[in-house]
Image (cartoon, rainbow, N blue to C red):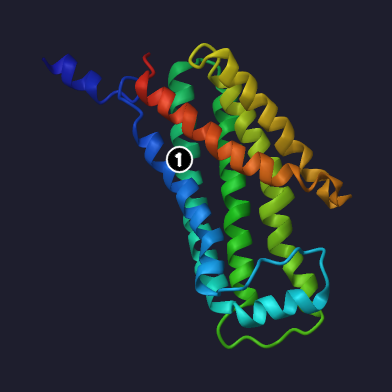
Amino acid sequence: MTLDTTDSFNPAKRPTKILIIFTALHFVFFFASLVAIPVLAPGSRIPNPFGNDAEVRMFFLTASSAVRVSDFLQLASALCLAALSALLSDALSASNRRSSPSWLTLGGGLGAATMLSLSALFSWAIVAPGGVDLGPALHAFQFIPFLLGGPAWAGFFAIFLAGICMGARGALPRWLIGTGLFLACISALATPVLLTIVFSPCLPIARFLGFVWLIVISIYLARRPVTA
């Protein structure tokens, strides 16, 4: 009786349904951060960081309150990603004796969450209450949250996905592993945005298809609990 009770608290034998919760919240909060701006500031649209100065300044001056709400939701999304990274790393280490994939998962996920958090915080600082109009310098400052939440996030997210795929061999079907590795490559290809905007389409592809992939594997792992 005592042995059964102890085993029920073994992380390797517990259902991983909590993964679905954090994965879903990660997506919901991030999606809400995008919707918040057009809802709270009708007519406003997040400007292209490579666009003209006038458009960038107009957006930040007229939609500052909406941007702050969006940044809060993005920070919440990043915190959910950090928790998800720890849970997935723990699940992989429990099911796989090789520790490298679990460390890649944890390091990549925490790195991506950190970049997303810093992106939100820097964006909030730009539109902080009582802030001054930075004039033409505002355009340069806008690149900071873009670079943190764009190519920097993408690089760590690629490591995160690759770690999951390597650690989940045998626990996930091959088509899911293959899809994850493909998305890891797409995410890695988003980092050369620092050199040319030709690679910019890789960012939304990696981000939103990555959301879908994480939700699918979370559901799959929840339905097929990892066993020691």
Image height of 201 relative to 136, above or below: above
Q: Residue at x 67, y 31 (%)?
A: 183
Q: Is residue 226 left or right of 182 when viewed as pictured?
A: left
**Percent coordinates x, y for residue 69 in the rendering:** 50, 69
Q: Quadrant of the C terminus?
A: top left
Query: Which residue occupies the extreme left position in the image?
Result: 1
Q: Residue at x 49, y 46 (%)?
A: 27
Q: Is residue 44 left or right of 171 when viewed as pictured?
A: right
The residue pinned by badge 1 equals 23
Image height of 187 relative to 34, above or below: above
**Percent coordinates x, y for residue 73 in the rendering:** 49, 60
**Percent coordinates x, y for residue 126 in the rendering:** 65, 75
Q: Is residue 114 left or right of 152 when viewed as pictured?
A: left
Q: Quadrant of the N terminus?
A: top left
**Percent coordinates x, y for residue 36 in the rendering:** 51, 65
Q: Amino acid at mark 1?
A: Thr
Image height of 27 relative to 179, above or below: below
Q: Residue at x 61, y 45 (%)?
A: 111
Disc 1 on helix, strand or loop? helix
Q: Residue at x 30, y 24 (%)?
A: 14
> Which is more toward the observer, 217 or 212?
212
